Image (cartoon, helix red, strand yellow):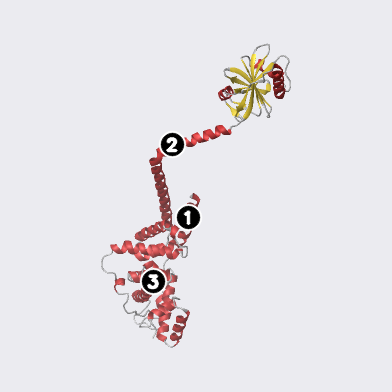
Amino acid sequence: MLFRKRDLRESFERQAEKVFPSVLGTALRLTRSREDAEDLAQEAIVRAYDAYERFDGTNFKAWMLRIVTNLYINRYRQRQRGPQLGSLEDEGAIEPVSSETETPDRLLFDNAIGAEIEEALAKVPEDFRMAVILSDIEGLSYQEIADATDVPIGTVRSRLARGRSILRKALETYAIKEGYLKQGADE
Amino acid sequence: MIDPMDLHAFVDGELSPEQASSVRMSLEGSPHAAREVEAIRNLKGLLGQKTESISSQESWQSCVKRLDELDRAKEGAKAKRIESVVGRFAPVMCVALLACILAVGRYSSSGNKGIVTGQSFSETVGGFSQIHPPKSAENIERWEHNLIKESFRSTPENLTIRPVRRGVVNDLLVMEFSARDPIGDLKIFLIQGPLTLEGTQPMAGQPDLKVGTLKGMNCIVRGDGQSTTIIVADRSAEDLAKVAAQLKI
């Protein structure tokens, strides 16, 4: 019994340590507060450890991100006041990611640094941001994102499309503001 | 016209091979859709490569501490549950423990086949039934002679021996003899097997003898692994050792 418990702890710690940067990163990108993110990530680790015996063993990272996402939805969203932009119109028209002015990606992306991308990402409404983080930063599949956020796959698809479109615009705005991209720039 | 969400799913590798093939063909005829796919791909690559890495080591150490606390709390809760169960069933458990001790004691005493206390030996021997010899004098003499011969193989000249009782102690056959020599009366017990009389000690200068007391009198115990002889009399251990020396058991 004791050996089994020790094995369980070791196995959990080994796996959790590997995915912890993703857990904390996701928590930070969702809460946008280091303190809240650490609190959320630690709570997710504790809950996961408590439930580890029930883990089906398929994808530990997806399971952990599902826990941290659910925890965020249940804990932090309740605190927030006002309507959630991302929650209002999942079914709205999908705007293209590519710029209407055909701003070349080279100009837009080559100069972008991590902090700018994080800042642009923070401007994306929460539900869309969540889908973009889980897909494009953490590499989860649509099904895993649907499980983590408790929405149908169709909603995941639309949120991703809209989230990416908003993110691209935020990056463009940032690039213009910083001066390495002129408004209406053409290749 | 391609569904914009299909373009995202195409980049994300979420379409079936047939759907992906269909989108690929459509892209050839639609520069706008091809540009959109390129933009999605670039954005996806940007997020995957250029997002900031989060320093997490310190936070992870805090997690490990919390896991330790959780383990300790679980252990504590378990101990409390055990305490609660023990508290509730303490009287029953005490009785069960006592029963176990008694059972083990009984088993243990029955298992120590070759060891007997002096008191137990005396009491058991006292309960032996008397040997009733044949009525005619000639028969008595022959019977006694045979018994003694069986038991001692030779009769010492200065020692007369008469069988008195037979019985069993610790599953070993015990024969009691009354003996007399010039000094006085003795009791001799011949046990057909190894028997240790508790409380006896090795006798100084006589490595094959042990000395002790039986019913308040000195006794000498001699054993060879096959049989045991106990000689009891109200005389010194040294005198008993001399009697033992006369017996060729």
**Residue A153 locus on image (x, y percent):** 38, 73
Q: Is residue B132 visible?
A: yes
Q: CA distance from mark 1 to mark 3?
A: 33 Å
Earlier-in-chain disc, 1 versus 3 = 1
Name the residue type under label 3: Val
Q: Are marks 1 and 3 on the same chain?
A: yes
Q: Is residue A125 left or right of residue B108?
A: left
Q: What type is the residue that disc 1 sits on? A: Leu
Chain letter belonging to callout 3: A
User: Is B93 rendered above or below residue A183?
Assistant: above
How many angstroms separate mark 2 from mark 3 (CA)? 67 Å
Secondary structure, mark 1, is helix
Q: Are marks 2 and 1 in contact (CB under 8 Å)?
A: no
Q: Label 3, on which residue?
A: A132
Q: Position of residue B36 (x, y in %)?
A: 40, 81
Read off the residue under disc 1: A8
From the viewer's perspective, is the residue at label 2 or at label 3 nearer?
A: 2
**Residue mark closest to the camera, 1 vs 3:** 1
Labelled pair 2, 3 in contact (Cβ < 8 Å): no
Mark 3: few/some/many CA within 10 Å (<14, 14-19, 20+): many
Q: Residues within 10 Å of mark 2 (few under 14, many from 20)?
A: few
Q: Amino acid at mark 2?
A: Val
Q: CA distance from mark 2 to mark 1?
A: 38 Å
* Residue A162 picture quarter: bottom left
The subunit letter for the residue under badge 1 reads A
Q: Provide the residue designation for mark 2.
A: B95
Dot 3 lies on which element?
A: helix
